[in-house]
Each structure stands twice: as C-alpha cells, then as structure tokens.
Amino acid sequence: MLAPLICIDPGHATPPAIGRQVEPIGPGPRTLKIKDGGGAAGEAQIVLAIARRTRDELKRQGFRVAMTRTGSTFGLGTGGNIARAQFCNRRHAALMLRIHADGSTLPGLHGVTTLYPAYHRGWTDDIYARSVRAARLVQRSVVGATGATDRGLVPRPDLTGFNWANVPAILVETGFVTNTDERRLLHTGWYQARIARGLTLGVVAALR
C-alpha cells in the first residue's frame, strides 16, 4: 500500500504578466480573481525554503511528497491557483499544504495563522471537515514548534486554490514579513526548520 501523498504548494512566484491575468474563483461562476498578486516582499523565497525543509521532514516520516514548484518561478499549467489545485487533485493528495508568509500595513502584527476553505456546497463541502481538522492540528503544531503568537484559524471563501481543490487543503501563514523581528526569523535556517518540523508533526497528527 502506497504511503499518503502530501502536496506542498509554496505560494506565489508567478511571473507578473501571468499573475495579473484572471481566472474563475470557483467552478462555474462568473466571479473572477487575479491569479497571483505577488505576495509580500521576499515571501516567495522564504516559503520555498520552508517548503523544501518540510518536504524532507515529511519524507523522513514516510510520506510521499509532490511540490507545485521546486524553483524560484511557478509555471504549472496556466499559472494560476486553479493549476495549483489541479496539480494536487490529479495526485489524489491526502492533503494540499499551502505555505505562505503574511504581510500587513501594520508593522506590529506578528504570528501564525492557518486558513481553511469556508463551507460552500458544490465546491468545498466534500473537503470541508477534513480541511478544518488538518488546519486545527497543523496550527497547534506550528505554534508549539516555533513559540510564535497563535493567530488562530480563519475560514476563507475567496481563495481560488481552495474552491477548486478536490482534496483537503489548508494554507499556513508562517509569520509576517512586514514585522521586523519576524522577518528576520523567517530568513534564518533554524527558524525555517522549526516551522517545517511543526508543519510535519501537524500533518502526521491529521493523517495518522
């Protein structure tokens, strides 16, 4: 029997010309959203480093892992969040683990937040309960591993990558790059390793 596959999605890194394009926010509706707003300054590089460490940790735990990007540019399919979700859907992932870093105009904000799909019949109803469970366990584990402020869980109805997912999906905001102290931590290997360890232990708890 094959080990569960975790699909890691390091956020952003879409070429700007593609990122400015739009795509349906969910199957069927007319509502459109840009493919990639670019994220906070430096975010794409930070989350890729965390994703690589998380991949290695998960493999040591016996999981199979696929990543939506392993380099500095995201180029799957048409380049949007639909493509990210479909990459994980095709692999029948046990979990789509989206890794991001937060940003704010308020430089004092700091801490870890985990987003999960809001309940929407026909879009996320089939993955909702498993996504909430994974979000809760991963958030608890990352906060425990890092000592970061626990900013809790947030349901999101407006994330294309959630609404197109057919597998459980969560998005972890690993810290604020707009906070001087947290940005410094996010750039260090030892803190990235702590985040990766927390993500891995949370995934283990959610799936085993």
Image (cartoon, grey):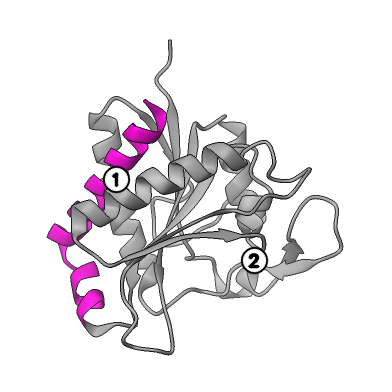
Which residue is painted at 49% across and 49% down in the image? 170
Image depth: mark 1 or mark 2 in front = 1
Name the quadrant of the N terminus.
top left
Q: In the rendered structure, which segment of residues is drawn in magenta? A: 181-208
- Report the amino acid beneath label 2: Lys
Name the quadrant of the C terminus.
top left
Near mark 1 (Cα within 10 A), the count class, few <14, some 14-19 or many ≥20, is many
Which residue is painted at 44% across and 41% down in the image? 134
Residue 124 visible in rendering: yes
Label 2 residue SS: loop
Tally of numbered tags: 2
- For this orientation, the residue located farthest to the left is 190
Q: Earlier in the sequence, mark 1 or mark 2?
A: 2
Compared with 162, 182 (above or below) is below
Residue 55 visible in rendering: no
Residue 63 rendering spot, x and y as whole percentages: 34, 28
Look at the image and say whether residue 102 sits in the magenta stretch: no
* Magenta stretch: dominant secondary structure: helix
Residue 173, quarter of the rendered image: bottom left
Q: Which residue is mark 1?
A: 54
- Report the amino acid beneath label 1: Thr
Residue 145 rendering spot, x and y as whole percentages: 20, 52
Horizontal relation, residue 1 to residue 132: left or right: left
Near mark 2 (Cα within 10 A), the count class, few <14, some 14-19 or many ≥20, is many
Residue 100, quarter of the rendered image: bottom left
Which residue is painted at 34% across and 88% down in the image? 107
Which residue is painted at 68% across and 51% down in the image? 163
Label 1 close to label 2 by CB (< 8 Å): no
Q: Which residue is mark 2?
A: 35
Residue 67, quarter of the rendered image: top left
Residue 51 rendering spot, x and y as whole percentages: 34, 51
